Image: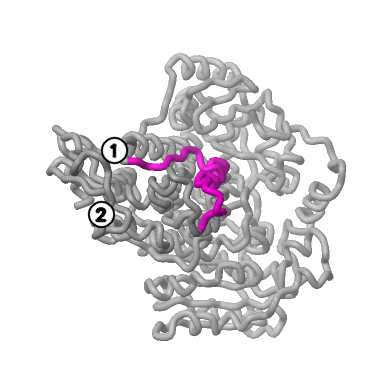
């Protein structure tokens, strides 16, 4: 039983049948051992440690190298197998699931399967999302003899894809009966400590090999803090904060990963500090609260947010990441006024103190931070207060009217998944209700992420309403996962912004070029294709009045999957996108930037 695993306090050595390993004719590639009461199979060991870590779902596809282990998943109580339509979707689904549940896992097969998931793992690496990537591989003997096998390059080198994995994960291993316990615990420790993906290969003859049962559960590692470094950080922070009259905070994604919403909110409330968020940090704070001022993305920020962040005489950046799309080139921030809290280090005016885990550094700052007496202004919504759509209007739907309407339909506790591109810019104009979890990848920005991520998020939190907003171009990459939503009785609201192609790319270049056009699908008919025997609701809204009528019928969780296709003009851009397009074009294609950045090009130290 996974909820109460059988751990032995007096583990016995494994007993081999006849000494050396031999294959069993009854099980493909397995290793025969005499299993004592104090042994367990390697695959079951891995599953029990994953369960201890917090994994409750494994996404993926079966393949001929992984099905022995997949059989073990199916038999293991406490971890559910969730089939996916392809490995990329499995990775994105695990990403969405992990953002709600804290951690998730995928299972792929050697070669084509694992390589298809690399895009998703790279995104999790960039966005700090803990995913355990498990790969079923050829047997140890096949790899030892450098046998030419399918799913390989037929060159006898079985480490090609491990080397690929090293680029997109923080720890990797290939399990053997001899190293299984030590290596599983090492890799899972890194996954949780660094909040990033890891890679475990389990050869086909290893999953059922018997090893000593561990004497105790796997426990999540505690954050590492060197007391002397924490004291030195506190002293340096006191000096920088001394006399500060306009301190402020800027939050990124790491406080979300470390579950620090209450800690940040408490510090802001008790010390009366304003807090801005990077797009990475959406959902950490109650955006209707008095201390939240809006989204900061450098020179593209509204004036009120820029004044708070760039006008601060002491700015605490909590788990932030600066890159080209969120203000790296245009942020007017002086490093000597910044306290920056990273995953395992704290930096004061450029001086680094490590190891100092982020939660400990934040607690320290809460204790020593001065109270702010100077006031500030909150940023208004870019589109103004959410207007009521005119149900009698036959006017085409404009971006300026669409996003306030979507904001008005969101409810406390929703899971909101805006796709990269038009939806992410529209979402930036919105002030979200309290308790809304935002699932989006601003750094990686791989279009097609949102649909499988929404599926994964709903797997993790089935009792919450999921609102997915995707563009037509993005949806066409990973649309298959709507079939998994239907098959598992999920009831999301899916809003498809049909603007005839890649409008986000039109904002950069090729405004009228045909390469930014895509095939115009009948989006409302897709659910019928994906599930013959499942009911759903579908609408097309071409005018403001039609959209008003559709949204008026939605209040709370829908009775079934609901898809709303919203047609907009291909050249109608949401607020912020035109300026972003010009800046991106300059960064992508021009030899020199329009202005000299103030921040180091590698971001804050």
Q: Position of residue 209 (x, y in %)?
A: 27, 46
- Foreground of the two, 251 or 5: 5
Q: Mark 1 highlights which residue? A: 218
User: Which quadrant of the view contains residue 388?
Assistant: bottom right
Residue displayed at 78% across by 61% down: 507
The residue drawn where x is 30% and y is 57% is 73
Front residue of 255/75: it is: 75
- Which image quarter holds the C terminus? top right
Mark 1 Cα-neighbour bin, 10 Å: few <14, some 14–19, many ≥20: some
Residue 58 vertical position relative to residue 535 in the rendered view, above or below: above
Camera sees residue 264: yes
| Between discs 2 and 1, the one toward the N terminus | 2
Q: Is residue 319 magenta?
A: no
Percent position of residue 573, x then y = 74, 65
In depth, the one of 135 and 579 nearer the eye is 135
In depth, the one of 491 and 27 nearer the eye is 27
Residue at figure coordinates x 48%, y 24% from the top left: 356
160 within the magenta span = yes
The residue identified by callout 2 is: 24
Secondary element at image label 1: loop
Left or right, residue 352 beside residue 493: right
Above or below, 128 against 446 in this view is above
Which element is circle 2 on?
loop
- What is the number of the mark on residue 435? none
Q: Is residue 308 above or below residue 558?
A: above
Q: Specify the segment rendered in magenta.
A: 151-176
How many numbered marks does the figure carry? Answer: 2
Q: Residues within 10 Å of mark 2 (few under 14, many from 20)?
A: few
Percent x, y for residue 401?
A: 67, 70
Classified by dominant secondary structure, the portion drawn in magenta counts as loop
Between label 2 and label 1, give the one nearer the viewer: 2
Q: Is residue 437 visible?
A: no
């Amino acid at each position: 039983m996974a909820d109460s695993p059988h751990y032995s306090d007096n583990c016995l050595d494994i007993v081999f049948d006849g000494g050396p390993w031999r294959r069993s004719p009854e099980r493909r590639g397995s290793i025969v051992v005499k299993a004592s009461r104090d042994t367990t199979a390697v695959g079951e060991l891995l599953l029990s440690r994953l369960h201890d870590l917090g994994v409750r779902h494994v996404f993926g596809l079966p393949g001929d190298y992984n099905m022995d282990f997949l059989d073990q998943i199916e038999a293991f109580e406490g971890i559910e197998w969730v089939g996916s339509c392809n490995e990329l979707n499995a990775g994105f689904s695990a990403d969405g699931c992990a953002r709600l549940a804290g951690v998730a896992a995928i299972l792929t097969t050697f070669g084509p399967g694992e390589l298809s998931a690399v895009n998703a793992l790279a995104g999790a690496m960039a966005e700090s999302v803990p995913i355990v990537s498990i790969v079923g591989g050829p047997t140890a003997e096949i790899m030892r003899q450098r046998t030419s096998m399918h799913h390989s390059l037929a060159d006898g080198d079985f480490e090609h894809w491990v080397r690929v994995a090293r680029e997109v994960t923080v720890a990797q291993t290939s399990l053997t009966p001899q190293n299984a316990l030590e290596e599983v615990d090492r890799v899972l420790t890194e996954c949780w400590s660094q909040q990033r993906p890891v890679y475990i290969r389990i050869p086909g003859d290893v999953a059922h090999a018997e090893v000593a049962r561990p004497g105790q559960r796997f426990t999540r590692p505690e954050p590492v803090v060197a007391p002397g470094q924490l004291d030195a950080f506190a002293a340096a922070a006191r000096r920088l904060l001394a006399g500060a009259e306009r301190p402020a905070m800027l939050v990124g994604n790491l406080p979300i990963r470390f579950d620090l919403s209450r800690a940040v909110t408490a510090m802001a409330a008790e010390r009366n500090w304003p807090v801005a968020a990077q797009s990475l940090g959406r959902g950490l704070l109650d955006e209707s609260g008095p201390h939240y001022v809006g989204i900061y993305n450098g020179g593209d920020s509204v004036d009120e947010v820029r004044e708070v962040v760039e006008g601060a005489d002491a700015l605490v950046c909590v788990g932030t990441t600066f890159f080209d799309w969120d203000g790296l080139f245009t942020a007017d921030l002086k490093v000597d006024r910044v306290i920056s809290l990273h995953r395992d280090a704290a930096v004061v005016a450029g001086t680094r103190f490590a190891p100092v885990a982020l939660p400990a550094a934040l607690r320290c700052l809460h204790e020593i931070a001065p109270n702010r007496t100077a006031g500030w202004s909150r940023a208004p919504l870019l589109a103004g207060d959410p207007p009521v759509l005119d149900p009698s209007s036959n006017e085409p739907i404009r971006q300026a009217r669409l996003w306030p309407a979507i904001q008005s339909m969101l409810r406390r506790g929703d899971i909101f998944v805006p796709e990269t591109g038009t939806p992410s810019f529209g979402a930036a104009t919105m002030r979200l209700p309290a308790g809304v979890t935002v699932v989006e990848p601003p750094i990686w920005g791989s279009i097609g992420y949102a649909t499988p991520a929404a599926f994964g998020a709903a797997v993790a939190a089935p009792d919450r309403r999921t609102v997915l907003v995707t563009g037509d171009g993005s949806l066409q990459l990973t649309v298959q996962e709507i079939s998994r939503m239907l098959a598992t009785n999920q009831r999301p609201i899916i809003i498809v912004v049909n603007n005839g192609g890649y409008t986000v790319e039109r904002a950069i270049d090729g405004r009228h070029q045909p390469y930014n056009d895509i095939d115009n699908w009948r989006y409302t008919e897709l659910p019928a294709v994906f599930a013959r025997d499942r009911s759903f609701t579908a609408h097309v809204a071409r005018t403001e009045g039609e959209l008003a009528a559709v949204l008026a019928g939605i209040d709370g969780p829908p009775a079934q999957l609901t898809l709303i296709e919203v047609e907009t003009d291909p050249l109608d851009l949401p607020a912020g996108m035109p300026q972003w397009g010009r800046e991106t074009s300059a960064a992508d294609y021009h030899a020199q930037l329009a202005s000299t950045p103030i921040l180091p090009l590698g971001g804050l130290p």
